[in-house]
Image (cartoon, coloured by chain):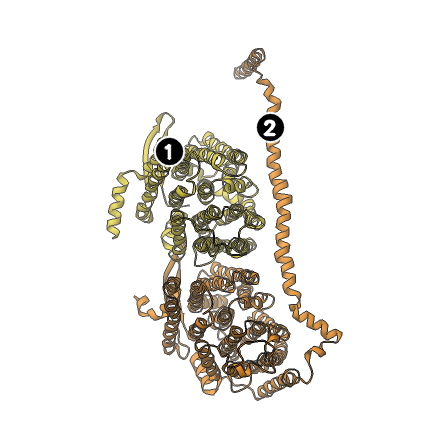
């Protein structure tokens, strides 16, 4: 069995899956837009979904190679004059992110088919979604910071249009706020990259890693600039205010991508560039980063407690959870780092599930204010179950996936001997539980049962079912992905 | 392949946990099949547990496990089963009593809709509890601990249309979660300090470390106290007891399951496990860990009296028994907190006794509620004639709870009192003795109000109103089981656990027990049996009226918690949102945006489109550039 897997795996590598997983969605995105215009709008969605299936498939097929410790790398010569090569690399650190992006990307696009069916301009919608996903894939596969930055922007621009044109509420203003704020972050990131390049004449991660091993006087400045770039993307307190607006008002499948996946690229940047290249600066920054992460946990949690808009609750919850990831990554202990990276995946799955459930509630009940909802337990028992599974997982309740990443984060905290912060962080899980249970009560159990409301259609329920099953199984079978993350942690 | 050899050990929790997921589907197909299936699964699990008894008889223990989660640096967390007398007896309670409660549920829930959810969570609940008590390490224990928490949340809130039920469910889950935070902290500090979570390894590491001086007693004490914090949440000890009386909003068999077979026993189990396996008496003297033991005994003793006092005034048939549970659990903690083998044996013995008589009392209460449709004991009475089986079995339960021989409560309580006397733990002893007097009083008050006197209700059926057989059979079995405290059984339990010390109850204990029971009975006789003096007239006095109000309002603790932790925290969050999030943080963003806009407004006049201005601008710029260049070049030269 394993032999056969490896064989398939060798074959798949001759296909250059990494280049394909960027080229396919990017190359086909104009065609998808054309499809939407010329043929039936729905065909654009079907086409986009089938294209996005492939990067996910590659992710699954590459699992044995990555799990055996191999690194998949593909190279094209790009601008030889500048010494830039187009190199994509999937290693143990980027693999969890890659898998999360492609899996959630595929599922949320599939979910869009039904959820977005009455919207206008679907061709462009799917086309932009594909570019957005390509940008995220590119960010985690890049091996030089120049390419990294290009993909970072490729991720921002389509998502701005998606929010501004298909969003709800004051979409144009919110889209603009999103664009402006994250762009300030991107500029800070760019400044850091340029500074690095001017000092060392290279933007290749491998080269920089060797150079920076000796330490550098300007490192703290560079690290700060890059950290601000990553922190804005992650929405770390106090740079978080773009997130609740954007995540709540984006069309739901895009909220899934934003909250489930996109903010994790900030975590990736933090882990890859700051954690990987500048461990010394990383250590110096801890007295600031650690308290910030704990404040973020509570800030997001408290705000989530007093929101009444279902998507805003989820958005603030994402802020709070980002606090946990940053905490895990920052505690300077290998188990904490493993936990932080694992939490990227477990939170990504659960938050995607929760946004889909929120979309399903809005789709069926036509209402998003939890004080006006209620009585949906009977008619929407499926959505209720998956909502509870997602919420409990994020609140760190075993045997769901979220618990396994959270206990490792906390164990790391104790191992690094930062007792008080860690106990506070654990206490945060009680707050998380509080606001999820409150939301669950308001949406589902309170009030008279509303029999007239119908459960959402199969094509929306299927992605939710898949995510819920993965969350339950990932709790029981943590080893597969944890092993890969452990290897990544060992290399850091 | 060791895994397969001990398959039955795995199955006792794996079977209910996995079968639970089939139950809703089966119930959808055929309700009867689904219900019987879930009862059968728990029964099989109970039988399997029973067959494990010979393997652990006399204190033998064995572990089966496998590597589960790999950790960075090559270590791993294991998933395993620890079989020893303690885990097997706890599993037997969960599955054995659980089976009876499940059987009873079929009758009790017969008029309810949506029982798929009910039987799913009941089965999962039992499976989770077995996982908790049989896990060979702290992580597995914590997983079971939380499964139990989730199931209790879902079952307490089973009647989703009732506001009290919904709120009680959240209250239970979040309050116990506060305890869980402490337990998780304890577990993870343990892991960070000793690098293992296995019970057996922990004992060795701590022992060697303490001998060599690596392990600080302060750290060990912190770990143990945090763990006890977790136990306080799950087992509803003061000040985390508030969730338990409200948990009565669930269906009655759920209350029975929570109180008798699962959940609240988890905390007692945890403390018993620590003092049995991790820091056993043989290796750590009570004096070394006196801080820990004193806290347990004192909190336990205090809670015993505190909860019993509230049981005196409640008018809800289930809440009286709920307060009694808090009080009896506290008794078990007090026993464990003595820190001797005899105290430990008394505590565990009382877990067994309490499971039996408390399940009996709850199920009897359920039969009454099922018949009358009310929980108010002031609207009951006279059921002695119409519900004879329920009455006589309840009577047995009350006698056992009050500690009257020959029922099991007497024997286990006797050992606890004996151990307290022998070790001179005076303050807890005082608490426990007074609590035991109150126990007799509230038990007989309950019995009298529900079954004796004239009917104060308007029930249509004046003749025979006994519950269906699926409900009375468990009652009869449980009533018979209350005789298991008698000497041969006590001996068996003693040899089964394999304690090395002699357990001898000093003669003076009997005097104390008799005194306690006699004074309790005397008060009950005056107020409730003969009603020579009515409690209503007694509380006319200003002091007693005030005490009564204090007790009825549960010492205002629930009100205070809600005010501070629920409303207060929400209010704080709202204020922070309004004043900081929206005004300051968002405000800075908007101020930056406005400032930028103003800057742009100011400089946009440059771009007027007037060519004269533009060209002169370009010219000025060019001149400045040339000047800079000149200066640089001259500088170089």
Residue positioned most to the right: B542
Residue at image position (36%, 72%) is B44
Give whichever of A486, B132 is nearer the camera: B132
Q: Secondary structure at mark 2?
A: helix
Q: Which mark is residue B338?
A: none
Residue at image position (33%, 69%) is B7
**Residue A364 picture location, percent across and down:** 46, 48
Query: Would you say B302 lies left or right of A382 here?
Result: right
Query: Would you say B175 lies left or right of A82 here?
Result: right
The chain letter for the residue carrying disc 1 is A
On the rendered image, what quadrant is the N terminus of chain B found in? Answer: bottom left
Residue B300 drawn above or below residue A52: below
Give the CA distance from mark 2 to mark 1.
38 Å
Q: Which residue is mark 2?
A: B597
Q: Which residue is mark 1?
A: A36
* Chain B visual colour: orange
């Amino acid at each position: 069995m394993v032999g056969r897997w490896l064989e398939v795996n060798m074959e798949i590598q001759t296909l250059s899956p990494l280049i394909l997983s960027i080229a396919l969605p990017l190359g086909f995105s104009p065609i998808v837009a054309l499809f939407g215009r010329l043929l039936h709008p729905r065909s654009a969605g079907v086409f986009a979904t089938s294209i996005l299936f492939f990067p996910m498939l590659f992710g699954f097929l590459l699992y044995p190679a990555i799990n055996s410790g191999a690194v998949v790398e593909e190279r094209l010569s790009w601008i030889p004059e500048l010494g830039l090569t187009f190199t994509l690399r999937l290693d143990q650190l980027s693999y969890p992110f890659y898998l999360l992006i492609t899996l959630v990307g595929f599922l949320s696009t599939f979910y869009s088919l039904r959820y977005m069916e009455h919207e206008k301009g679907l061709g462009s919608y799917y086309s932009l979604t594909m570019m957005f996903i390509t940008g995220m894939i590119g960010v985690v596969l890049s091996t030089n910071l120049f390419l990294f930055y290009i993909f970072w922007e490729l991720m921002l621009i389509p998502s701005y249009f998606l929010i501004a044109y298909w969003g709800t509420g004051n979409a144009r203003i919110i889209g603009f706020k999103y664009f402006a704020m994250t762009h300030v972050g991107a500029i800070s990131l760019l400044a850091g990259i340029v500074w690095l390049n001017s000092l060392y004449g290279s933007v290749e991660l491998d080269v920089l890693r060797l150079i920076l091993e000796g330490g550098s006087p300007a490192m703290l400045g560079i690290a700060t600039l890059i950290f601000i770039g990553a922190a804005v993307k992650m929405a770390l307190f106090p740079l978080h205010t773009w997130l609740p607006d954007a995540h709540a008002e984006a069309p739901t499948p895009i909220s899934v991508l934003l909250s489930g996946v996109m903010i994790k690229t900030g975590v990736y940047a933090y882990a890859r560039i700051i954690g990987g290249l500048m461990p010394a600066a990383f250590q110096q920054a801890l007295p600031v980063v650690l308290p910030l992460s704990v404040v973020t946990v509570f800030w997001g949690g408290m705000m989530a407690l007093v929101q009444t808009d279902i998507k805003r609750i989820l958005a603030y919850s994402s802020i709070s959870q980002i606090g946990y990831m940053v905490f895990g990554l920052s505690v300077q202990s290998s188990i904490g780092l493993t936990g932080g990276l694992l939490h990227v995946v477990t939170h990504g799955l659960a938050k995607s599930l929760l946004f889909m459930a929120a979309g399903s509630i809005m789709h069926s009940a036509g209402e998003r204010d939890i004080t006006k909802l209620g009585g949906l337990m009977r008619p929407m028992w499926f959505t209720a179950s998956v909502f509870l599974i997602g919420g409990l997982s994020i609140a760190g309740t075993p045997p769901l996936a979220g618990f396994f990443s959270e206990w490792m984060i906390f164990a790391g905290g104790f191992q690094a001997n930062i007792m008080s912060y860690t106990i506070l962080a654990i206490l945060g899980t009680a707050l998380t539980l509080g606001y999820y249970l409150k939301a669950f009560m308001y949406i589902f159990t309170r009030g008279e049962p509303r029999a007239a409301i119908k459960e959402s259609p199969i094509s929306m329920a299927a992605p939710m079912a898949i995510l819920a099953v993965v969350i339950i199984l990932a709790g029981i079978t943590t080893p597969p992905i944890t092993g890969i993350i452990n290897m990544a942690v060992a290399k850091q | 392949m060791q895994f397969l050899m001990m398959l039955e050990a795995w199955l006792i929790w794996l079977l209910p946990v996995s079968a639970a997921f089939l139950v809703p589907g089966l119930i959808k197909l055929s309700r009867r099949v689904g219900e019987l299936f879930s009862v059968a699964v728990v029964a099989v699990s109970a039988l399997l547990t029973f067959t494990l008894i010979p393997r652990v008889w006399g204190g033998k223990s064995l572990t089966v496990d496998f590597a589960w989660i790999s950790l960075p640096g090559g270590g791993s967390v294991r998933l395993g089963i620890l079989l020893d007398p303690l885990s097997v007896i706890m599993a037997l309670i969960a599955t054995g009593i659980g089976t009876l409660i499940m059987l009873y549920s079929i009758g009790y829930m017969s008029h309810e809709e949506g029982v798929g959810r009910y039987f799913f969570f009941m089965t999962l609940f039992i499976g989770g509890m077995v996982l908790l008590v049989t896990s060979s390490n702290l992580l597995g224990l914590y997983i079971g601990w939380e499964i139990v928490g989730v199931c209790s949340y879902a079952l307490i809130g089973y009647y989703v249309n009732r506001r009290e039920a919904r709120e009680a469910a959240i209250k239970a889950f979040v309050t116990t979660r506060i305890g869980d935070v402490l337990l998780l902290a304890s577990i993870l500090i343990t892991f960070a300090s000793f690098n293992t979570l296995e019970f057996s390894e922990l004992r060795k590491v701590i022992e060697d470390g303490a001998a060599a001086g690596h392990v600080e007693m302060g750290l060990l004490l912190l770990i143990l106290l945090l763990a006890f914090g977790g136990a306080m949440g799950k087992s509803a000890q003061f000040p985390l007891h508030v969730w338990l009386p409200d948990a009565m909003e669930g269906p009655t068999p759920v209350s029975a399951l929570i109180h008798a077979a699962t959940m609240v026993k988890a905390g007692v189990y945890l403390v018993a496990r620590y003092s049995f396996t991790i820091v056993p008496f043989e290796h750590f003297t009570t004096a070394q860990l006196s801080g820990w033991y004193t806290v347990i005994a004192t909190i336990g003793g205090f809670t015993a009296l505190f909860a019993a006092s509230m049981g005196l005034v409640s008018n809800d048939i289930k809440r009286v028994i709920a307060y009694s549970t808090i009080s009896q659990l506290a008794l078990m903690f007090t026993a464990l907190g003595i820190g001797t083998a005899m105290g430990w044996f008394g505590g565990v013995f009382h877990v067994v006794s309490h499971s039996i008589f408390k399940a009996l009392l709850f199920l009897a209460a359920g039969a009454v509620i099922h018949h009358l449709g009310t929980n108010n004991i002031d609207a009951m009475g006279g059921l002695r004639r119409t519900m004879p089986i329920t009455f006589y079995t309840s009577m047995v339960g009350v006698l056992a709870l009050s500690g009257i021989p020959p029922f099991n409560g007497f024997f286990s309580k006797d050992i606890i009192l004996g151990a307290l006397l022998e070790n001179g733990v005076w303050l807890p002893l005082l608490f426990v003795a007074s609590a035991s007097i109150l126990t007799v009083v509230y038990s007989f008050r309950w019995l009298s109000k529900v079954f004796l006197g004239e009917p104060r209700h308007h029930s249509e059926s004046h003749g025979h109103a006994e519950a269906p057989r699926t409900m009375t059979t468990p009652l009869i079995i449980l009533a018979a089981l209350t005789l298991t405290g008698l000497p041969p059984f006590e001996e068996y339990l003693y040899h089964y656990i394999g304690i090395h010390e002699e357990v001898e109850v000093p003669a003076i204990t009997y005097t104390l027990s008799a005194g306690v029971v006699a004074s309790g009975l005397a008060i009950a006789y005056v107020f409730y049996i003969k009603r020579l003096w009515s409690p209503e007239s007694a509380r006319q006095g200003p002091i007693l009226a005030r005490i009564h109000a204090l007790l009825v309002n549960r010492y205002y603790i629930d009100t205070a918690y809600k005010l501070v932790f629920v409303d207060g925290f929400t209010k704080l969050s709202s204020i922070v949102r309004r004043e900081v999030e929206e005004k300051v943080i968002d405000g800075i963003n908007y101020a930056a945006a406005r400032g930028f806009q103003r800057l742009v407004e100011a400089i946009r006049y440059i771009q007027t489109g007037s060519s004269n201005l533009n060209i002169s601008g370009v010219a000025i710029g060019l001149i400045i550039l040339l000047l800079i260049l000149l200066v640089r070049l001259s500088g170089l030269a």
